[in-house]
Amino acid sequence: MKIEWLGHSSFKLTESTGTTIVTDPYDKSIVGFEMSKTSADVVTCSHQHKDHNAVIRIDGEPLVLSECGFWEVKGVDVSSILSYHDEKLGKKRGENKIFKFRMDGVELCHMGDVGEECTAKIAEGIGSVNVLMIPVGGNNTIDARQAKEYVDFIMPDVVIPMHFKTPNSQVDIDKIDEFLDLFDEEQIRRIDGQSIEFDRAHFESDSTLVIVFDQSMF
């Protein structure tokens, strides 16, 4: 299966069968740069803020998922659980849905704009994960330290940081550096581009690998 970073918290996930999912599409008016038009079978929106729900950027007639539940779409299992966008149980910024996908036998989790610290309840709700996509920029979400706590609790094979300050971003969030400083350099793999492919055979390491995509176009 293939993971392509579309900027901010948006990814395009493609199974070998061709089934596609786009997470949290965003609006330029909030983020500061344009999201490229793309198509998908499914679009997930972790919450209804404009930098996470710009479904208009997705061509076709995708199934849009924004609530808690379980779905099977063209052979792909999708589920979501409730979390909160802040440490006050949603009183400041509302709810956040954490989505999980199973594609080509790979378990992926997209944390959306989670803003509450990791708890056993959330970790148990997520379960085992091969690839964890998690916000690290702070301010509107968990920060680098809190994100690392999630990583240590969930113990994914691969972590993909998201929702951090990039060169063209106008969002008031931190850069990725503070999060990367919490890992050994040999755990960090920098990608010359915005996509990577995985299958079950990639997940045999004893330590977590952090994937950092090229940020220059964002």
Image: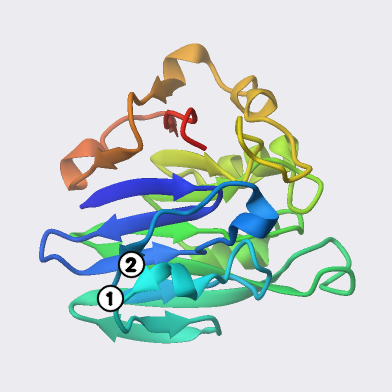
Q: Please tell me whether residue 150 is drawn above or below residue 18 in the rendered image.
A: above
| Circle 1 Cα neighbour tier, 10 Å, few/some/many (<14 / 14–19 / ≥20) | some
Q: Which of the 4 image quarters holds residue 71?
A: bottom left
State yes or no: discs 1 and 2 in contact (Cβ < 8 Å): yes
Residue placed at 48% from the left, 68% from the top?
99
Say which of 60 and 91 sits in front. 60
Upstream in sequence: badge 1 or badge 2: 2
Q: Which mark is residue 41?
A: 1
**Left or right of residue 4, residue 99 in this image:** right
Residue 51: percent from the left, percent from the top? 63, 61
Residue placed at 40% from the left, 46% from the top?
5
Dot 1: element:
loop
Residue 140: percent from the left, percent from the top? 78, 53
Dot 2: element:
strand
Say if residue 128 shows up in the picture.
no
Residue occupied by mark 2: 21
Say which of 190 and 123 sits in front. 190
Residue placed at 41% from the left, 85% from the top?
70
Give the number of marks: 2
Q: Which mark is residue 155?
A: none
Residue placed at 53% from the left, 16% from the top?
184
Disc 1 residue type?
A: Asp
Query: Can you name the residue that lies furthest to the top here?
Result: 185
| Circle 2 Cα neighbour tier, 10 Å, few/some/many (<14 / 14–19 / ≥20) | many
Q: Which of the 4 image quarters holds residue 186?
A: top left
Q: Please tell me whether residue 31 is drawn above or below residue 114 in the rendered image.
A: above
Say which of 16 and 131 sits in front. 16
Disc 2 residue type?
A: Ile
**Left or right of residue 171, residue 164 in this image:** left
